[in-house]
Image (cartoon, rainbow, N blue to C red):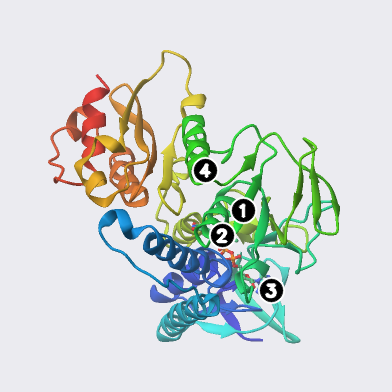
Amino acid sequence: MEEFDLGIVGGGPAGYTAALHAASIGQKVVLFEKDEIGGVCLNKGCIPTKAILHSSEIYKQIKNSEELGISVTDVKLDYKKVVLRKNQIIEKLRKGIELALKNVGVTVVKSEATISTNNEISANNETYNCKKIICATGSSPRVIKGLEFDGKFLISSDDILNLEELPKSILIVGSGAIGLEWARIMSNFGVNTTVVELAPHLLPLADVEVSKRIERIFKTAKIPFYTNTSVKNIEGKQVTLSNDSVLNVDKILVATGRTPNLKQEKIDGVEYLGDVAGEIQLAHFAIKQALESVENIPFRKDFTPSVIYGTPEIAWVGKREQDLGAGSYQKSVTLISSLGKAHCDNETDGFIKILSQEDRIAGVHIVSKEASALLQQVLIAMQNDISVTKLKEVCFAHPTYSEGIFEGLFKLN
Ligand SMILES: Cc1cc2nc3c(=O)[nH]c(=O)nc-3n(C[C@H](O)[C@H](O)[C@H](O)COP(=O)(O)OP(=O)(O)OC[C@H]3O[C@@H](n4cnc5c(N)ncnc54)[C@H](O)[C@@H]3O)c2cc1C
């Protein structure tokens, strides 16, 4: 029986990060992956959606370029090429991870594995003895009663990635990050897109002001949505909603969350990292958990950022306004339309909202182009307990979107 310091089941962000870092500090590591290295993030999640989103945004921009002084005729969309490009990106990045694993000497076993005890993993009729075991088996699209996937009409976030052609119309059930990003992609490509959400607002986990702004943006983009609503009945391609609206759609994307891939009871002494742990199902959370486990690098879970991609981006971290007691905080809202750079880019929609308590930033909620990058600036300050007073000393370049943060700091007093 071969012996290892660390055995990892699952080669997604949690698993491959743990493997790379453990091996780089001298541990003997075995990593099991039944499908493709890179996990959901690389093969079915973060990367493929952002690659397709990029194509859709360029398509929309070209179609609307007249007001920028550029007129383009005969714009053609070749969706097969969009998918091909997405696949090429995945392959290139996957090879990079595989090479990195090889270079640090991780043994990769391409097989389904079962954790038998807190020291034993079995795969391919062999047993691997490991001093420590990490289970990083990830998650799968949640199946909802009455909306079970058939891969053709009722599709999951896995199925939608490999459509050979775009549908004419789509109903998206669920308005979390996955639902909203696909609503934007489909709408950018000119697909007749409708969103249905059970909660009172789109993006239910966001600060409520962010949700309301997104609803406005969806209205302007002519993406109809129904909140406080569910799917009541499906007959053929006819969908009746709980508010009795009737829609005829080519496809339904069900994006109502993800279920941990946990086939057996949790075993004491085994560490569960990433999506399978069922805490925060984000790639960067999985990566940070892996680093904490392997290299003891601590992280503040409550400072895990959330980002939803598309135009404009949506990003937040820390407390939402609805989490804070009345009178216990200060707030500033800076409109993106007040920034010179936004006008130059023709991207004036959105705001930067800063919430502070006792001269410290408690939460930031951004709807803006470059929101993902803007957020990190504030997050570094939050993590390092830098006061609002001290942050005002920083020189923010002009013209940039980060000037909105600068303006917001001064409005807090
Ligand atoms: C459409 C979509 C878009 C997303 N976009 C983002 C985003 O923009 N940003 C973000 O942070 N997150 C995003 N996510 C979430 C992100 O993909 C996950 O949080 C992340 O992949 C979790 O990493 P993980 O390592 O825990 O699990 P996974 O990435 O799910 O990897 C688990 C791996 O384990 C393997 N496995 C499972 N069981 C076994 C077994 N018994 N034996 C061997 N191998 C096994 C699986 O094949 C898989 O490769 C998105 C998800 C989806 C679906």
Q: CA distance from mark 2 to mark 4?
A: 13 Å
Q: According to the image, label 4 marks what residue?
A: 218
Q: Quadrant of residue 54?
A: bottom left
Residue 331 placement, left or right of 160: left
Q: Earlier in the sequence, mark 1 or mark 2?
A: 2
The image shows residue 357 at horizontal and vertical percentages of 35, 23
Disc 3 on helix, strand or loop? strand
Residue mark closest to the camera, 3 vs 4: 4
Real-space CA distance between mark 2 and mark 3, rounded to the nearest whole angstrom:
45 Å
Is label 3 in contact with label 4 (beta carbons under 8 Å)? no
Cα–Cα span, label 3 and label 1: 48 Å
Question: Does residue 193 sit above or below 205 in this rendering?
Answer: below
Q: Residue at x 54, y 45 (%)?
A: 222
The residue that label 3 is drawn on is 120
Q: Amino acid at mark 3?
A: Glu
* Left-right relation of 392 to 314: left
Q: Is residue 276 above or below residue 31?
A: above
Mark 4 to mark 1: distance in Å? 10 Å
- Badge number at residue 186: 2
Cα–Cα gap, marks 3 and 4: 51 Å
